[in-house]
Image: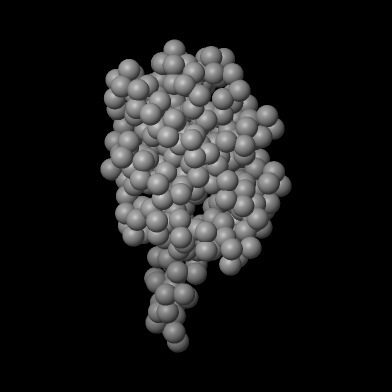
Amino acid sequence: MLVSATEMLRKAKAGKYAVGQFNINNLEWTKAVLLTAQENNSPVILGVSEGAGKYMGGYNTVMGMVKGMMKDLNITVPVAVHLDHGSLDGAKKCIEAGFTSVMFDGSHYDIDENVEKTKEIIELAHSKGISVEAEVGSIGGEEDGVIGNGEIADPQECKRINDLGVDMLAAGIGNIHGAYPDNWAGLSLDTLEEIQKLTGDRPLVLHGGTGIPDKMVRDAITLGVSKINVNTECQWTFAAATRKYIEEGKDKVGKGFDPRKLLAPGFEAIKATVKEKMDLFGSINQA
Ligand code: G3H
Ligand code: ZN
């Protein structure tokens, strides 16, 4: 069932678990995430970065593919199609293309401008029943050309964005896109707690879900995180499984070069990673 993220995240916050956002890149990624959600009776969010949307042909292609696949594969669990780290223009295009959820990432603007632009997207999206994620502070590292300085969010600024009626709020709390360095200081759970106090029932979002220790993930969920974004880890496991297949020479045996065979180990690896995360986040059997 194609839905906005509002209700699934409200349920997750109340039930003290988190819904995974898994970024998609192509047909194999989409199919792997959707099937894993269905097999585990879990709600799921398909994350689409602007770069990945462009790669797949455009936002209309993404929506066509997801809708068709959900029908053909009989996917009945709640699924949201969500723009990840969107610009103002990108968010407007996704709303137009029928996405059920958008992130407007105004974290690189000063807070007044972030508030103004977030407000504009909320009005537009809510008039069509689409959920909105906003960001305060910054996620460190780089994802698909989105570069952040890792600035820890100011809880009062989070409250300002929260009070606009955003559906989910991402805050920089020391999280980083991609690999965490060996000397990483960890998540600032104190900041998260302060934000949670000021934002009440609002579902909070944890970006940079690759490589955070399990206990820290569980602590963050206890402190109000209801959506966790995972991207890099699926790319790593897909690449490792594909590399193994080729290094073992399997593409040279029979019709092992057929893309349907060549991409199968990577596809299974994404499924295994997504299931592992759903288990950690507690979303299995919550559809
Ligand atoms: O927006 C997407 C994410 O925050 C994913 O982060 O690539 O570190 O898993 P990650
Ligand atoms: Zn992110």
Residue 136 falls left or right of residue 197: left
Where 195 falls versus 224 (above or below)? above
Q: Position of residue 89 (x, y in %)?
A: 31, 40
Q: At x 69% / y 43%, what residue is drawn?
A: 286
Residue 105 visible, this orientation: yes
Return the x and y of residue 73 as percentages of the image width and height: 60, 65
> Measured along the vertical axis of the image, is residue 176 above or below residue 67?
above
Q: Residue furthest bottom?
A: 254
Q: State the residue in front, 119 or 144.
A: 119
Give residue 94's position: percent from left, percent from top: 40, 46
- Given residues 121 and 32, the one toward you in this image is 121
For the residue pair 25 and 266, the one nearer the viewer reads as 25
Does residue 23 appear in the picture of this structure? no
- Residue pictured at 44% horizontal, 30% vertical: 123
Vertical position of residue 92 compared to residue 41: above or below: above
Give the answer, above or below, for where 246 lies relative to 118.
below
How is colour applied across the structure in the image?
Answer: one colour
Q: Is residue 162 left or right of residue 37?
A: left
User: Residue 269 appears at what percent x and percent y?
Assistant: 52, 60
In the image shown, does 111 or 259 lie closer to the viewer?
Answer: 111
Instruction: Tell me the residue at 34%/60% (across/down).
Output: 57
Left or right: residue 75 versus residue 88 is: right
Q: Residue at x 57, y 60 (%)?
A: 70
Residue at the extreme front of the image, as rendered: 127
How many marks the image carries: the answer is 0
